[in-house]
Structure formats: structure tokens, C-alpha cells
Amino acid sequence: MIVSAGWAAAIALAGSLLLSMGMTLQKRHVVWLGSPRPWGRAFFRHLGLWCLGILLMNLQTVSQYFALMGLPANVVGATTGASVAFTAMLAMLMLKERLGGRRLAWTLALFAAMAAAGFLGEGSGSEAKDLSPAALYVFLGIPLVLGVSLFSLRRHIKGPRLAASIAAVSGCLNGFMLFPLRALQVDAAPSLSGWLSSPYLYAYLVAGFSGFVLIQLAYRDGEMAAVAPALYGMQVIWPAIGSHLVFGTKFFPAQTAAFVAVAVCVGAISGPKPPGARRKPPIPPRMSS
């Protein structure tokens, strides 16, 4: 099955919107973890909405699967950067944060950079011939080792920098998930038994579970303004780097510049506001009913 590049981009963006909705719900309702008064009405309300966030977040996998039929993994990874723009808008509604003119301008630049990244490369069909399983596992192993190391540090020290580092590793794992998803398309039998017997399915599940656990820790220790740039930035950068080694994707300097522009826009949108900017007070992390 082949999907046109235009439809693939639309599908990928729809998945990014679902991801943003899911993550914003998780951030808003993660307070159920470690609640001093579990089993109350507020506890179950927060838990239910947090679980809804997980469901929405995982629906992105379906959109990515079909988007990979029309776009290469590095471009689909770049469209994930749209999540930070969607998250900024949703945070304005759900987390009482402001979306100023600066973030709006960076949002427009972000979508322009993603469009450039899509036009300045190859189609997804070029990835079917040069899959390197060894490189795929290397790009899984590196963030896993870093994640274990940062988790060990978290037992002794906490702070926004460590939370941002944990979020960055989670972003690498989330971005990596495109690789085994595409590998299943091009190197596994197109059947349930073929998927279940493929090691790529389990690499996908390991990355997804590990990234999920790490981002929950980052949410607990850091604010969205510190966590989001690292998370979304690495979701773009990790597939952009890995695609050349895992799939033998050709290197295009102009496309690489577009990926860098996407990462810069991601950081600008999701980063803290300039000094002196007025903010509404954040929602206090308590178990309100």
C-alpha cells in the first residue's frame, strides 16, 4: 500500500495533534501518582483522564504507520515537532498558559520548516533496500543506557536540568519507535504471525514502555516549559540522525538544515517565556475535586 506524500503528511500531523492532547492530559492529571489520599473521587477523576491521555497518545502509532507509507522516517519524525505547537495551544486552554505573538510566529516557522524537510528528500520507498538491523539496535541501546543512568542519578538529586535530560532521553526513545515500525513494514511478513515473530515488534515495545516511564518521571520533577523542548526536540533529531545509518537514507544538506530549523522552532515554542512576560499562575499540583 502506497500513500501519497500529501496524505501522509496530513495523517502524520493528525497523529501529532492526538499526541499533544494525550500528553497535555497526562501533565494536567499526573497528580494522581503519589496521592496522599487515594481512592477518593478526585483520585479516580485524575486517574481516568490520565488514562485517556495515554489512549490518545498511543493512537499516534496508527497515524505514523500509514504516514511511513508515503514519507521516510526522518520526515515523519520531523512532523512530530508539530506536537509542540499543538501542545502550546492546548496548554493555553487546559493548563492556563499564555500563547503570545512570539510563539505564534515560531509556530508558523515550524510548519514552514517541516514542509521544507518533506520536499527536500526522498520518498519512503528508498528505505526498503538498505535496512541495517545492527544500527537499529544501536540507536535503541544508547538511550536505554542513558535512561538507566539518569534514573540512578534521580535517586540522589533532582532538579529541572535532570528532568530535561530525562525528557530528552524519552524523546530519543519516542523518535526511535519510527525505525522498528518502518522495519516491520519492509522486513516482516505482512501478517499477525509475521509481526509476532519479528524482533522489531519487541524493540518497538521496549522503546515505547521505556520512553513512557521516563517522561512520567520528567513530568513529576520539571515544568512543561523545561520538559517539552527536550522531549520534542529529540523526537525530531534522533530519527533525523538515525535514518542515514539505519535505512541508508541519502544525506541532503538542505533537508538537514530544515531538520535543524524544526528543532530550533521546537525549542523556541516550548521554552520559557522572555523575562518580564506576564503569566497566569500555574495550576497547583493538588488533588482537587
Image: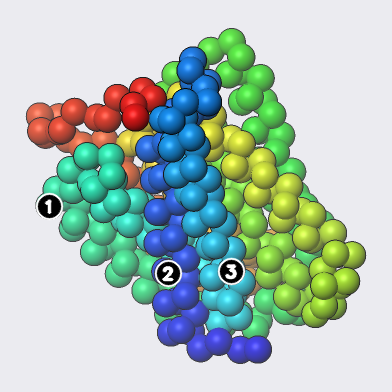
> For the residue marked with disc 2, what is the amino acid?
Ala
For label 3, the residue is: 62
Rendered view: 105 above or below 275: below
Q: Quadrant of the N terminus?
A: bottom right
Q: Secondary structure at mark 2?
A: helix
- Upstream in sequence: badge 2 or badge 3: 2
Q: Position of residue 98 (x, y in %)?
A: 17, 43
For label 1, the residue is: 101
Q: Give how far apart the Cα atoms at labels 3 and 1 are.
A: 33 Å
> For the residue marked with disc 3, what is the amino acid?
Val
Q: Residue furthest top?
A: 156
Residue 146 visible in the displayed image: yes
Rendered view: 147 above or below 12: above
Q: Quadrant of the C terminus?
A: top left
For label 2, the residue is: 14
Q: Give how far apart the Cα atoms at labels 2 and 1 are.
A: 24 Å
Q: Secondary structure at mark 1?
A: helix
Residue 120 visible in the displayed image: no
Nearer mark to the viewer, of 2 and 1:
2
Q: Position of residue 109 (x, y in %)?
A: 26, 63
Q: Position of residue 10 (x, y in %)?
A: 42, 77
Q: In the image, what residue occupies the spot 79% across and 54% down?
A: 202
Q: Position of residue 17 (x, y in %)?
A: 40, 62
Crowd band around label 3 with a 10 angstrom C-alpha radius: few (<14), some (14–19), many (20+): few
Q: Secondary structure at mark 3?
A: helix
Contact, mark 2 vs mark 1 (Cβ under 8 Å): no
* Front-lying residue, 253 or 165: 165
Q: In the image, what residue occupies the spot 39% across and 25% down?
A: 287
Q: Give how far apart the Cα atoms at labels 2 and 3 are.
A: 10 Å
